[in-house]
Amino acid sequence: MTDKLTRCEQVWYTITCIPEGNVASYGQIADLAGLPGRARFVGTCLKQTPKEKVLPWHRVLRSSGELAFPKGSEQAQEQMERLREEGVAVNNNRVKMAQFQWVPDMATLLGTLKF
DNA sequence: CGACTGACGCCGA
DNA sequence: CTCGGCGCCAGTC
């Protein structure tokens, strides 16, 4: 099996595990996906993500808490909108990470993510 | 095979 | 706070 897909799948899967009302940074996703230091790879995967695949990509932001897209872009608008619908406050294209950042519990780490 | 790119992160000025 | 640069490495050309 093409293990290159395995990496992306792991990334996608990890993103899928982000609970509503929470967000995670690219680096965090990469780390949870077993790809420490490959934050960029996460972005690459998402860009490659087929439309058929429905992922909560809007819950993925930069480590600073700002949205992954420049303010004004349609993607940023949509992301902001979706986050607000989930109860995540977005101000000036940015989210308060200290308040909304996803903190995976042990059960998730050991069970869901199978690490 | 080599060069460029990028939905990133971090540190320094 | 902003701006610039370096590291990271898979994907694309």
Image: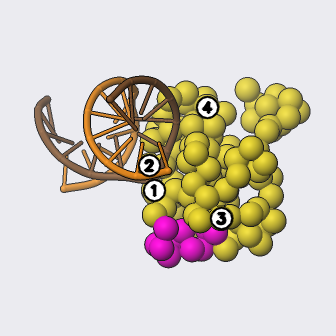
Chain colours: A yellow, B brown, C orange
Name the residue carrying label 2.
A44
Q: CA distance from mark 1 to mark 3?
A: 28 Å
| Between marks 4 and 3 in the image, the one whose residue lies nearer the viewer | 3
Q: Are marks 1 and 4 in contact (CB under 8 Å)?
A: no
Pointers 1 and 4 within a single chain: yes
**Which span of residues is magenta-colored?**
A71-80
Task: State yes or no: residue A78 in magenta.
Answer: yes
Name the residue carrying label 3.
A91
Query: Considering depth in this image, is A29 or A115 the residue closer to the camera?
Result: A29
Labels 1 and 3: the sequence-earlier one: 1
Pointers 1 and 2 within a single chain: yes
Q: Is residue A78 above or below residue A3?
A: below
Q: Secondary structure at mark 4?
A: helix
| Between marks 1 and 2 in the image, the one whose residue lies nearer the viewer | 2
Q: Position of residue A38 (x, y in %)?
A: 48, 34
Q: Secondary structure at mark 3?
A: strand
Name the residue carrying label 1.
A48
Q: Are marks 4 and 3 in contact (CB under 8 Å)?
A: no
| Residue A18 makes an appearance in the image | no
